[in-house]
Image (tube, rainbow, N blue to C red):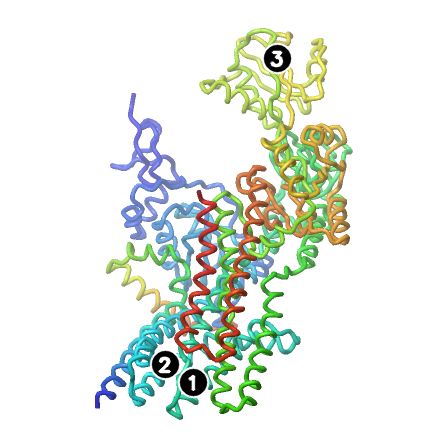
Amino acid sequence: MSKNIACTHCHLEFNEDVMIKDGEHYFCCNGCQGVYHLLNEEGLDSFYEKAGNTKLTPQTSQYEDSSNFNSPAFYDKFVTIDKDGFSKVSLVIEGIHCSACVWLNEKALHKMDGVIEADINFTNNKATILWADDVVKLSQIIDMIRAIGYNAFPYDASVQESYANKERKDYYLRMSVAIFSTMNIMWIAVAQYAGYFSGITQDMKTILNIAEGVLATPVLFYSGWIFFRGAYYGLKTKVVNMDILVATGALLTYLYSIYITIVESGEAYFDSVSMIITFVLVGKFLEVLSKKNAADALDIMGKHIQSEINVIKDNQLVSCKLDDIKVGDIVVVSSGEKVLLDGEVIKGSGTFDESSLTGESEPIYKKVGDKLISGTVSIDADVQFRVTKDFKHSTLSTIVTLLESAINKKPKIQQMANKLSEYFSSTILILSLLTFLGWWFWPHSFEISFMVAVSVIVIACPCALALATPVATLVGLSLGAKRGILFKEAAQLETMAKVDTLVLDKTGTLTVGKPEVVKEHILEDFEKEILFSMVKNSKHPISKGILRYLKENDDGLKDIIFDEFSQVPAQGMKAIYNGVEFLGGNKLLMKNSDIEVEFSSDNSIFYFSVDNKIVAIYELNDKIKEGAKEFIEFIKSKNIDAIMLTGDNAKSALRVANEIGIDYLYEQSPQDKANYISNLRENSKTVVMVGDGVNDALALATADIGIVMGSGSDIAVDVGDVVLLNNSLKSLSDAFKISKTTLGLIKQNLLISLIYNAITVPLAMAGYVIPLVAAISMSLSSFLVVGNSMRIKYKWSK
Amino acid sequence: MDNWVIAMMLGASIFLGAIALSAFLWALKNGQFDDEEKFLNAAKFDSEEDLNDAVQKELKKEKLKKEYKPE
């Protein structure tokens, strides 16, 4: 027995006998050998030193022709020209395992003539490449990436994604300036306060004031620019928002402090100016952080465009771009492939999985003359079909188009804190004006009255109010993330807590979505290994269900190589081993082989026969998920109406509904589901839709909140607002609990900051607030809010 | 005179701090912190050869920028 050794390139271990020996090196395949020599020739072999023992993907050579990447249509779609005239493309690079891989790709690309810049992101493997198109073509760049053992495909770097990043960067810049200045101002303020209590010369005070003023200026006018802009838009739309309060408060305090510094009497408040701006800016930044950071919806189309389709033209099989296919073309679909166009079968037959479109859990048998819907997947069918609609008008595209308009129509969520801050801001501004008038007419100097009025605004500065919501939602988001619940936007936590109607899909949401064995009848002993090998060779969901069942019960089953094996479309499979015939499939298969069956059940049935005698019967069904009944009870106890909408037939809908106790509607098309939800919403209900398939996508986008199972189709996951990564109903009820907790937390935090203001604002109006107290109490209220949020987080994690 | 010492020290330290801050802002704007993993891994690829490569890359970029005149 020879030992296993690792391939020099990819480090995967194989038996010595099957390896290619090349000098002192061993390779698992020609691809790896090729890459190794290429890297050596190019002087990039220090890659192996950097990569260490990381296992890489072996090189494969089955790629579509890269010259496609040079077509004008492709350039139109993915390539942009920058201001210097260089071309730019965004690529996703496959096969990156470690930092050395990134290093290698960047190095190899930089070595090419004409490539200006190749920048690969470690975290998401997305690359931006800048090149001179006269010198080198995109196809050569992609060929290079493939030559060193990776693959690349372009994606549309959507406008919104880069916009979100830009906004974030802008906040980083403004925050660094604000935090830097505030920290330094605080040191100086320590001296000021010490002087306030123990005496300080006026000269020294002025020096400190000037230093503080210098530091506070960039904070107010650079970091605080956001608030001035917000205040301007607020005034324009005649809404008194929080920005107006922050901007007037900070600006008035700043001007007053400059005045104090010049006349050399009284106390300057530069520290308060920078602290207000910094605290509220941090609150705003937290909000930006928890916003949806990528506009996934726009990417939906891009994912399908990449695929090439096999078309028969002049009796020859050619591959063709999806967009180029016209009505009347003949398309070939083989088993396992996805149907991307609508059409009519003209040759062949077989079963198709329509579950993602219709919710039908059973595969459907299609023969010549039957209609194919785009978005379905061929299970075992090799068919040719005539296209009846081009891609732009296909069912799949129609759904996507409807989706995009539904997403655009989605109402903006009005957060509670925003509503509150409107009233709050106008109240404080009026109070401070009244304070000023009161003190002035109660004969005091202009200076003193102005200072008291400003102190009202400063003390009421909505630091705590600004932090209340973002901190609470961040806690909610992290609680969710730990339990496999991804909220795409923080504001959805608030909406979800107010939900009163829950709409559920059946297949894949309440049920597992694939048939599982529910009963096994063994009539006679037989070799399990034969059945195991048979079902392993089939892609049919029923076979897969039996395969899972067999694996669960016996781990040690081995593969058998049959003398003969064939699949009978829509019936089952036949195998011959050691001269004995084995049949596995449905009733029809048994009938055709003249085997009598007297068995009936509501479930799907799989018969297994040896030598024309049935030895085992398996009953399969789309199992209801664990905890479904408890979940519905939980939802009802929260006074939320629940209803199940399914595209499936009445019988299977009834079975599930009866078992878990839920109202239902059956045979609902994607549009029906969406209409049902928009009706509910017109009756001012707040609706959560839970689903997983393409057929749910429209409904998910129409609902206030769309929750998607992580295993769902790409489109659904893109459209949904909340993704449940582990697909369980337990995390669905957790999502509800977390949103309720978060809303409670937001309310608590808002209450804390309002109580704080109710105490301090009257004190300020009476003129009892000295600068030190104002500064301390401002930080204290913010700490209270953050501390309260941490308390909830701690309670949950226990 | 004591006051002037304090004023000078304050001025000098704020000035030095401002230089550090502007360096940080430059790095931030330049995208050096965009990819936190790359930023952390950079220490691994910090040999003489890597430095040379980086310089070559800049030179190549400058050269291409000068020569390249798309129609």
Query: Circle 3: is it few (<14), some (14-19), or many (20+) Cα within 10 Å?
Result: few
Counting residues from the start of the chain, the first of labels 1 and 2 encountered is 2
- Parent chain of label 2: A
Task: Judge depth for marks 1 and 2 and give the one in front.
Answer: 1
Badge 1 and badge 2 in a common chain = yes
Question: Where in the figure is residue A747, as x and y percent of width and height?
Answer: 56, 57
> Mark 1: which secondary structure?
helix
The correct choice, above or below, for A610 with respect to A653 in the image is above
Counting residues from the start of the chain, the first of labels 1 and 3 encountered is 1
Q: Is residue A370 left or right of residue A632?
A: right
Q: Amino acid at mark 1?
A: Ser
Residue of label 2? A212
What numbered label is drawn on residue A743?
none
- Parent chain of label 1: A
* Front position in the image: A273 or A95: A273
Q: CA distance from mark 1 to mark 2?
A: 10 Å
- Parent chain of label 3: A
The residue under the point 59% across, 32% down is A627
What numbered label is drawn on residue A257?
1
Counting residues from the start of the chain, the first of labels 2 and 3 encountered is 2
Badge 1 and badge 3 in a common chain = yes
Q: Are circles 1 and 2 on residues that touch, CB within 8 Å? A: yes
Task: Judge depth for marks 1 and 3 and give the one in front.
Answer: 1
The correct choice, above or below, for A262 with respect to A768 in the image is below
Q: Amino acid at mark 3?
A: His
* Front position in the image: B43 or A588: B43
Question: Where in the figure is residue A302, as x and y percent of width and height?
Answer: 59, 52
The residue under the point 71% across, 35% down is A662
Note whether residue A313 is visible.
no
> Mark 2: which secondary structure?
helix
What numbered label is drawn on residue A521?
3
